[in-house]
Amino acid sequence: MMVLAPLYTTNYGAAYVGDSLLLLDQIEPNSIDLVLTSPPFALQRQKTYGNVEQADYVEWLLAFCKKIYRVLSPTGSFVLDLGGAYQSKRPVRSLHNYRILIKLCDELEFRLAQEFFWFNPAKLPSPIEWVNKRKIRAKDAVNTVWWLSKTDHPKANVSNVLVPYSDRMKKLQANPQKYYKPKERPSGHDISTSFATDNGGAIPSNLLEIPNTESNSQYIQLCKSVAISPHPARFPQKLPLFFINFLTEPGDTVLDIFAGSNTTGFVAEELARKWIAFEEELPYLAASAFRFLSKNQNQDVVTLYNKLLCQQEPICITIAGVRGHWHRPAVQG
């Protein structure tokens, strides 16, 4: 599929260094089952991982989305995690995340399959000026997550992402006669006798409560051992876990065009999905290989990281009994 050599590969995936706008052109049309990504947000302050000014953000991101449309399969999904932001020096929200949604549907003919909202209860109060200092706004703790598709019927199975029943529902299932009577409710819902059936879990809502609290993972520990900083804008594994389980099957292909520390690729690997990761910053992508190391290979992490960074001929490092091997690319995008 790709002409360029990857930075590293695993049993199921490959990670590439380069500009995603160029790398997307290397992918065959209609070949990707899920594009799941979290681009640099349109923040007021410049971040170390790179972000675009709010005024230019919509058109900048739209250029990537045009190419995503080409590579996405007819039954595939495009899941876009977008954080909100305030306008510069004003306690007024930017509308960039909604403007990009409108353009995706009106100009590129994506369908909005459903809007999701990722609630991070562990997020620190921000922005400081309006929340902490002046105390005139509540903290911003929810990201918009747009689930888009090329057709009205993308592949999806909510049975793969059921959540535990509430205590009240468990009581109802144990003794349905005590807690409800089958009849049509004022809302128009017809509650039948099958309402108390145990289906293995409850249907999840489109509000995903997932704390972003990674602090002592293998990836974090190994970054410290090499004396480098982890990627500063990682999303939690449970976010891609939900959508990969929901929208793909084993053997499908998942693409992240702003891979960062490659959380998406790691989760896809664990779920036996093929994956492709694009990341422009070599140090971040090199460190993302730490996620795939076995415990007995951790002592070689400094050697691995340095080999991934060096500009030499392709190097293959076999990870015995785990997931694969690593390569230095012959050409970078």
Image (tube, rainbow, N blue to C red):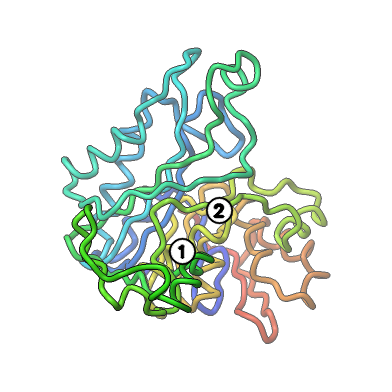
Which of the marked residues, 1 or 2, is nearer the chain's N terminus? 2
Which quadrant does the N terminus fall into? bottom left
Q: Name the amino acid type tagged 1.
A: Phe
Q: For numbered disc 2, what is the local secondary structure?
A: loop
For the point 81% across and 49% down, the residue is: 227
* Element type at mark 1: helix
Judging by the rendered image, the residue that carries numbered circle 2 is 210
Residue at x 25% of width, y 57% of height:
149
Disc 2 marks which amino acid? Answer: Ile
Label 1: few (<14), some (14–19) or many (≥20) C-alpha neighbours in 10 Å: some
Viewed as shown, does residue 110 lie left or right of 9? left
* Residue 226 falls left or right of residue 199: right
- Against 143, is 288 above or below? below
Q: Residue at x 28, y 33 (%)?
A: 99
Marks 1/2 in contact by CB < 8 Å: the verdict is: yes
Note whether 119 is above or below 8 in the view shown: above
In the image, residue 133 lies at what x, y percent?
65, 15
User: Looking at the image, can residue 274 be seen?
Assistant: no
Question: Residue 49, labelled with which disc?
Answer: none
The residue that mark 1 highlights is: 242
Gap between marks 1 and 2, in whole Å? Answer: 10 Å
In the image shown, does 259 or 140 lie closer to the viewer? Answer: 140
Looking at the picture, tell me which residue is in the foreground, 275 or 166.
166
Q: Residue furthest bottom?
A: 321
Mark 2 residue crowding within 10 angstroms, few (<14) / some (14–19) / many (20+): some
Vertical placement of 312 versus 253: above or below? above
Q: Is residue 59 left or right of residue 261?
A: left
Asked if residue 78 is positioned above or below residue 199 in the image, the reply reads above
Query: Seen in the image, is 135 located left or right of residue 214?
Result: left
